Amino acid sequence: MELTERQEKILELIKENSPISGEEIAQNLGVTRSALRTDFSILRKMSFISAKQNHGYCFVGEEPKNKIGQVMGEPKQMDSKSSVYETIVYMFENDIGSVFITENKNVLVGVVSRKDLLKAALGNKDLEKLPIHMVMTRMPNLIYVTEQDSIKTAVEKIMKHQIDSVAVVKQEKEVCYLVGRFSKTNISKLYLETL
Protein backbone atom coordinates (compact mmCIF):
# COMPACT_ATOMS: atom_id res chain seq x y z
CA MET A 1 0.00 0.00 0.00
CA GLU A 2 1.37 3.39 -0.96
CA LEU A 3 1.36 6.07 1.71
CA THR A 4 -0.14 9.48 1.08
CA GLU A 5 2.07 12.58 1.19
CA ARG A 6 0.60 13.51 4.59
CA GLN A 7 1.22 10.02 5.99
CA GLU A 8 4.85 10.22 4.87
CA LYS A 9 5.19 13.61 6.62
CA ILE A 10 3.65 12.16 9.79
CA LEU A 11 6.05 9.23 9.65
CA GLU A 12 9.03 11.58 9.18
CA LEU A 13 7.95 13.71 12.18
CA ILE A 14 7.59 10.62 14.35
CA LYS A 15 10.97 9.23 13.25
CA GLU A 16 12.72 12.52 14.06
CA ASN A 17 10.89 13.31 17.33
CA SER A 18 9.81 9.96 18.76
CA PRO A 19 7.92 9.94 21.10
CA ILE A 20 5.71 12.78 19.92
CA SER A 21 2.08 13.56 20.75
CA GLY A 22 -0.69 13.63 18.18
CA GLU A 23 -1.31 17.25 19.10
CA GLU A 24 2.31 18.20 18.29
CA ILE A 25 2.08 16.41 14.93
CA ALA A 26 -1.20 18.18 14.12
CA GLN A 27 0.33 21.58 14.98
CA ASN A 28 3.35 20.84 12.78
CA LEU A 29 1.07 19.99 9.85
CA GLY A 30 -1.39 22.83 10.46
CA VAL A 31 -4.44 20.59 10.94
CA THR A 32 -6.54 19.37 13.85
CA ARG A 33 -5.65 16.16 15.67
CA SER A 34 -9.00 14.61 14.71
CA ALA A 35 -8.18 15.15 11.01
CA LEU A 36 -5.21 12.79 11.47
CA ARG A 37 -7.05 9.86 13.10
CA THR A 38 -7.33 7.84 9.90
CA ASP A 39 -3.65 8.45 9.06
CA PHE A 40 -2.56 7.32 12.53
CA SER A 41 -4.75 4.22 12.25
CA ILE A 42 -3.26 3.24 8.87
CA LEU A 43 0.33 3.78 10.06
CA ARG A 44 -0.33 1.69 13.19
CA LYS A 45 -1.93 -1.15 11.18
CA MET A 46 1.06 -1.15 8.84
CA SER A 47 3.32 -1.46 11.93
CA PHE A 48 5.25 1.73 11.18
CA ILE A 49 4.30 3.40 14.47
CA SER A 50 2.99 2.52 17.90
CA ALA A 51 0.97 4.65 20.30
CA LYS A 52 1.89 4.73 23.97
CA GLN A 53 -0.53 6.31 26.40
CA ASN A 54 0.89 9.47 28.01
CA HIS A 55 3.96 9.24 25.77
CA GLY A 56 2.70 9.72 22.21
CA TYR A 57 3.61 8.05 18.95
CA CYS A 58 6.87 6.13 18.40
CA PHE A 59 8.48 4.90 15.19
CA VAL A 60 8.79 1.11 15.18
CA GLY A 61 8.63 0.01 11.56
CA GLU A 62 10.96 -0.07 8.65
CA GLU A 63 10.94 2.42 5.83
CA PRO A 64 7.69 2.26 3.89
CA LYS A 65 7.86 0.04 0.86
CA ASN A 66 6.60 2.17 -1.98
CA LYS A 67 9.09 1.60 -4.80
CA ILE A 68 9.19 -1.46 -7.03
CA GLY A 69 12.90 -1.96 -6.35
CA GLN A 70 12.05 -2.65 -2.68
CA VAL A 71 9.58 -5.45 -3.39
CA MET A 72 10.35 -6.96 -6.81
CA GLY A 73 11.18 -10.61 -7.25
CA GLU A 74 13.95 -12.30 -9.16
CA PRO A 75 13.57 -12.12 -12.93
CA LYS A 76 12.28 -15.28 -14.60
CA GLN A 77 13.85 -15.38 -18.04
CA MET A 78 14.78 -17.54 -21.00
CA ASP A 79 17.19 -16.84 -23.82
CA SER A 80 15.56 -15.95 -27.16
CA LYS A 81 17.28 -18.97 -28.76
CA SER A 82 15.49 -21.39 -26.41
CA SER A 83 12.79 -23.65 -27.81
CA VAL A 84 9.10 -23.43 -26.96
CA TYR A 85 9.42 -26.84 -25.28
CA GLU A 86 12.30 -25.67 -23.04
CA THR A 87 10.27 -22.61 -22.08
CA ILE A 88 7.23 -24.73 -21.17
CA VAL A 89 9.40 -26.93 -18.94
CA TYR A 90 11.00 -23.85 -17.29
CA MET A 91 7.60 -22.27 -16.58
CA PHE A 92 6.25 -25.53 -15.18
CA GLU A 93 9.29 -26.05 -12.93
CA ASN A 94 9.08 -22.46 -11.63
CA ASP A 95 5.26 -22.41 -11.37
CA ILE A 96 4.94 -19.10 -13.25
CA GLY A 97 2.40 -17.78 -15.73
CA SER A 98 4.80 -15.85 -17.93
CA VAL A 99 8.50 -15.67 -18.67
CA PHE A 100 10.61 -12.82 -20.01
CA ILE A 101 12.76 -13.40 -23.08
CA THR A 102 16.24 -11.90 -23.16
CA GLU A 103 19.28 -11.68 -25.42
CA ASN A 104 22.91 -11.13 -24.44
CA LYS A 105 22.05 -12.26 -20.90
CA ASN A 106 19.80 -9.41 -19.70
CA VAL A 107 18.56 -7.34 -22.66
CA LEU A 108 14.76 -7.62 -22.58
CA VAL A 109 13.31 -8.46 -25.99
CA GLY A 110 10.00 -10.18 -25.27
CA VAL A 111 7.58 -12.00 -22.99
CA VAL A 112 5.71 -15.28 -23.31
CA SER A 113 2.55 -16.23 -21.43
CA ARG A 114 0.76 -19.53 -20.95
CA LYS A 115 -1.74 -18.42 -23.59
CA ASP A 116 1.09 -17.89 -26.14
CA LEU A 117 2.43 -21.37 -25.43
CA LEU A 118 -1.00 -22.93 -25.73
CA LYS A 119 -1.48 -21.30 -29.15
CA ALA A 120 1.91 -22.65 -30.25
CA ALA A 121 1.03 -26.16 -29.02
CA LEU A 122 -2.30 -26.11 -30.86
CA GLY A 123 -0.49 -25.31 -34.11
CA ASN A 124 0.82 -28.91 -34.31
CA LYS A 125 4.40 -27.69 -34.65
CA ASP A 126 7.48 -29.41 -33.29
CA LEU A 127 7.82 -27.54 -29.98
CA GLU A 128 11.37 -28.79 -29.46
CA LYS A 129 12.50 -27.11 -32.69
CA LEU A 130 10.30 -24.00 -32.65
CA PRO A 131 12.33 -21.06 -31.20
CA ILE A 132 10.60 -19.09 -28.46
CA HIS A 133 11.19 -15.80 -30.27
CA MET A 134 8.66 -16.97 -32.89
CA VAL A 135 5.77 -16.91 -30.39
CA MET A 136 6.76 -14.14 -27.95
CA THR A 137 5.31 -10.65 -27.64
CA ARG A 138 8.11 -8.32 -28.71
CA MET A 139 9.37 -4.92 -27.68
CA PRO A 140 8.00 -2.24 -27.86
CA ASN A 141 4.69 -3.95 -27.00
CA LEU A 142 5.89 -5.04 -23.55
CA ILE A 143 4.55 -3.63 -20.30
CA TYR A 144 7.35 -2.80 -17.87
CA VAL A 145 8.34 -0.60 -14.95
CA THR A 146 11.62 0.64 -13.47
CA GLU A 147 12.92 0.08 -9.94
CA GLN A 148 12.06 3.70 -9.10
CA ASP A 149 8.42 3.44 -10.17
CA SER A 150 5.80 3.27 -7.44
CA ILE A 151 4.08 0.04 -6.49
CA LYS A 152 0.80 1.74 -7.40
CA THR A 153 2.03 2.33 -10.96
CA ALA A 154 2.94 -1.36 -11.37
CA VAL A 155 -0.37 -2.59 -9.93
CA GLU A 156 -2.29 -0.23 -12.25
CA LYS A 157 -0.39 -1.59 -15.27
CA ILE A 158 -1.06 -5.22 -14.28
CA MET A 159 -4.77 -4.48 -13.87
CA LYS A 160 -5.14 -2.31 -16.97
CA HIS A 161 -3.43 -4.81 -19.28
CA GLN A 162 -4.77 -7.92 -17.48
CA ILE A 163 -1.37 -9.59 -17.20
CA ASP A 164 0.29 -11.78 -14.55
CA SER A 165 3.44 -9.73 -14.11
CA VAL A 166 5.51 -6.81 -15.34
CA ALA A 167 9.19 -6.76 -16.11
CA VAL A 168 11.33 -4.50 -13.94
CA VAL A 169 14.00 -2.90 -16.09
CA LYS A 170 16.95 -0.57 -15.98
CA GLN A 171 16.86 1.64 -19.05
CA GLU A 172 19.98 2.87 -20.80
CA LYS A 173 19.08 4.90 -23.88
CA GLU A 174 16.93 2.61 -26.06
CA VAL A 175 17.92 -0.63 -24.28
CA CYS A 176 16.00 -2.21 -21.38
CA TYR A 177 17.98 -4.52 -19.09
CA LEU A 178 15.86 -6.99 -17.11
CA VAL A 179 16.57 -6.68 -13.37
CA GLY A 180 13.43 -8.10 -11.76
CA ARG A 181 9.81 -9.13 -11.90
CA PHE A 182 6.70 -7.80 -10.16
CA SER A 183 3.71 -10.14 -10.20
CA LYS A 184 0.27 -10.72 -8.74
CA THR A 185 2.01 -12.88 -6.12
CA ASN A 186 4.06 -9.85 -5.00
CA ILE A 187 0.84 -7.85 -4.73
CA SER A 188 -0.76 -10.58 -2.59
CA LYS A 189 2.28 -10.67 -0.28
CA LEU A 190 2.18 -6.90 0.18
CA TYR A 191 -1.53 -7.00 0.94
CA LEU A 192 -0.99 -9.78 3.48
CA GLU A 193 1.76 -7.75 5.19
CA THR A 194 -0.64 -4.83 5.66
CA LEU A 195 -3.17 -7.14 7.31
Image (cartoon, rainbow, N blue to C red):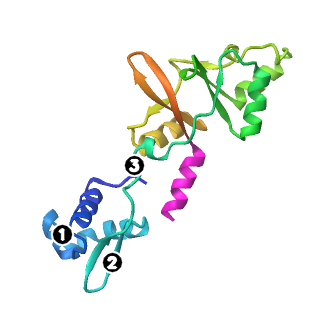
Q: Residues within 10 Å of mark 1 (few under 14, many from 20)?
A: some
The three-letter amino acid code for the residue at tag 1 is: Ala
Looking at the magenta stretch, what is its main secondary structure?
helix
Residue, x 42% and y 15% (percent of image)?
174
Disc 2 on helix, strand or loop? strand
3 lies left or right of 189: left
Which numbered mark, 2 or 1, is in the foreground of this view? Answer: 2
Residue 145 in magenta? no
Q: Which residues are magenta?
A: 183-195
Which residue corresponds to the image point at 80% horizontal and 23% vertical from the top-left? Answer: 85
Q: Do the numbered discs 2 and 3 sit on residues whose CB atoms are within 8 Å?
A: no
> Residue tagged by mark 1?
26
Label 2 vs label 3: CA separation? 23 Å
Q: Earlier in the sequence, mark 2 or mark 1?
A: 1
Q: Position of residue 89 (x, y in %)?
A: 78, 31
**Residue 73: assigned label:** none
Residue behind mark 2: 51
**Left-right relation of 70 to 102:** left
Q: Mark 3: few, some, or many residues within 10 Å (few <14, many ≥20)?
A: some
Which residue in the protein does label 3 denote? Answer: 66
* Residue 188 counted in the magenta span: yes
Q: Is residue 97 left or right of residue 36?
A: right
Horizontal and vertical percent position of residue 159: 53, 40
